[in-house]
Amino acid sequence: MTPIFQRDTSSLGTVIGIVVVAVAILGRLLFDWSWSNPDSFVPALIGAIAAAVAAWYLVQQARS
């Protein structure tokens, strides 16, 4: 069994990470999104989706 935190060379994971960071930065600069404001629906939704994808990916890696 390989460790969960072994270095991953997944280009898909890298692309997803870059897209999430770009959305966060552009959302803050262009739309004045506040990531800590609980009334902001779009940033909260993006964060929830990113967390769900990360959790799913970790579970899949742990199973293999």
Image (spheres, rainbow, N blue to C red):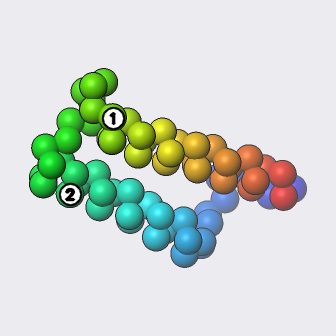
Which quadrant holds residue 41? top left
Rendered position, 24 above or below 10: above
- Residue 28 shows up from this direction: yes
Tell me the amino acid under the disc marked 2.
Answer: Leu
| Residue for point 48% across, 68% down | 14
Rendered position, 39 above or below 30: above
Helix, strand or loop under label 2: helix
Q: CA distance from mark 2 to mark 1?
A: 16 Å
Left or right: 29, with 35 as reference point: left
**Quadrant occupied by the N terminus:** bottom right
- Residue 3 shows up from this direction: no
Q: Nearer the viewer, mark 2 or mark 1?
A: 1
Q: Position of residue 4 (x, y in %)?
A: 71, 51
| Residue for point 30% across, 57% down | 23
| Location of mark 1 (residue) | 41
| Residue for point 55% across, 71% down | 12
| Residue for point 58% across, 49% down | 54
